[in-house]
Image: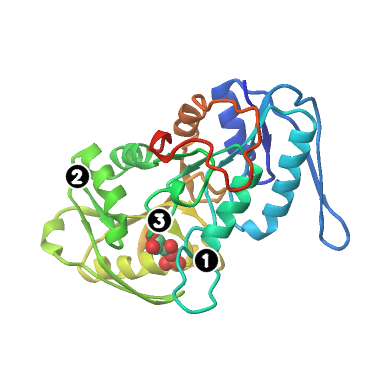
């Protein structure tokens, strides 16, 4: 059985997983030296057993060096494999070079994590130009979809819902959720002009008459995408607009701004700990994690340890 280590901030999610999997937990000591460098120590015995670290990778710059140190320490102390359960996987958005000199951070970050961990499990990664994680990650990477849990929440909490995606990329998850609860759905036309400057339009508002708009996005970051969408529906006279996000990054004033735009309820999945968390994904992640094979050897940097066609992503 895989033992789990919780990265600070992921306690509830890791506890939920451990309960479902029957895993033991290895305590982690993490502190900062006066210059800000990370001191890492795990407690307990990891010899001859697989270990997984539960660490959501929002604010990845703060966490990544410590995670790499911890993975090495576990392997040095005898763990047979070290996996990463990252309910949110950061550094996926910059997946291409749009201007000369730009860093393609998704590629570099994937190379670093692939060199440190034996496998990875994540939830709805933000894949755009890369169609699958296996295009950048060279370790087995499993994807969990939040759609079944979101569909169950909507069915239990919203009368006559219509599922709305803010852009064409969102069609994949919005159509999946809608199909599960036999609700109508559509995606909006979105133009992003800057980090906080987003415009959307509704292609066919008549389709939604008599329904409660339920906006669903994978990432809620500045909240500007959802705010732009909510304003359109409020202008059309929708009395109640619900906003659902898989990953609640929601920095600064984002949550206040979402409510100010007329969204009556903002609910998110618990991939990133946040007061809006209302949809628990630990069951879905535990289901996948149980099938992870234990791997004895650390993959060599950049080595594909099984052919693309054999990798399981769903
Ligand atoms: C973009 O492609 C994503 O799916 C989200 O729509 C975006 O990341 C949301 O960001 P924000 O909340 O800053 O508008």
Nearer the viewer's eye, disc 1 or disc 2? 1
Task: State how many labels appear.
Answer: 3
Label pair 3/2, CB-CB below 8 angstroms: no
User: How did the renderer colour the structure?
Assistant: rainbow
Give me the residue at 41% from left, 33% from top: 310
Q: Earlier in the sequence, mark 1 or mark 2?
A: 1
Q: Is mark 2 within 8 Å of ligand 1?
A: no
The correct choice, above or below, for 56 with respect to 221 in the image is above
Looking at the rendered structure, the secondary structure element under dot 1 is: loop
Residue receiving disc 1: 104
Q: Quadrant of the N terminus?
A: top right
Quadrant of residue 71 within the rendered picture: top right
Q: Residues within 10 Å of mark 2 (few under 14, many from 20)?
A: some
| Residue with the mark numbered 2 | 183
Neighbours of disc 1 within 10 Å: few (<14), some (14-19), many (20+): some
Q: 239 or 211: which is nearer to us?
A: 211
Which class describes the residues within 10 Å of circle 3: few (<14), some (14-19), or many (20+)? some
Residue located beneath label 3 in the image: 130
Looking at the image, the residue that sits furthest to the right is: 34
Point 45% across, 67% down: residue: 96
What x and y, as percent, mark residue 268?
A: 45, 49
Q: Nearer the viewer, mark 3 or mark 2?
A: 3
**Earlier residue among tags 3 and 1:** 1
């Amino acid at each position: 059985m895989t033992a789990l280590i919780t990265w600070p901030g992921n306690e509830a999610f890791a506890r939920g997983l451990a309960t479902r999997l029957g895993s033991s937990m290895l305590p982690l000591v993490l502190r900062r030296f006066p210059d800000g460098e990370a001191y890492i120590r795990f407690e307990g015995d990891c010899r001859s057993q697989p270990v997984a670290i539960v660490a959501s990778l929002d604010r990845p710059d703060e966490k990544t060096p410590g995670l790499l140190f911890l993975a090495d320490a576990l392997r040095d102390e005898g763990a047979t494999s070290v996996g990463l359960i990252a309910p949110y996987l950061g550094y996926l958005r910059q997946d291409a070079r749009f201007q000369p000199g730009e860093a393609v951070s998704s590629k570099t970050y994937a190379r670093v994590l692939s060199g440190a961990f034996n496998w990875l499990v994540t939830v709805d990664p933000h894949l755009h130009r890369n169609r699958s994680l296996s295009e950048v990650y060279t370790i087995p990477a499993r994807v969990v979809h939040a759609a079944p849990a979101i569909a169950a929440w909507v069915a239990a909490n919203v009368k006559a819902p219509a599922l709305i995606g803010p852009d064409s990329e969102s069609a994949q998850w919005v159509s999946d959720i809608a199909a599960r609860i036999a609700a109508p759905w559509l995606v909006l036309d979105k133009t992003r002009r800057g980090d906080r400057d987003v415009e959307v339009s509704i292609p066919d508002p008549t389709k939604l008459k008599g329904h409660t708009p339920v906006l669903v996005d994978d990432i809620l970051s500045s909240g500007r995408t959802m705010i732009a969408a909510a304003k359109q529906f409020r202008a059309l006279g929708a009395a109640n607009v619900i906003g659902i996000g898989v990953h609640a990054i929601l920095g600064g004033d984002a949550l206040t701004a979402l409510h100010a735009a007329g969204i009556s309820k903002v609910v998110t999945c618990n991939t990133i700990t946040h007061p809006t968390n209302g949809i628990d994904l630990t069951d879905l992640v535990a289901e996948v994690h149980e099938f992870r094979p234990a791997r004895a050897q650390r993959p060599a940097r950049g080595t594909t340890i099984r052919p693309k066609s054999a990798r399981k992503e769903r």
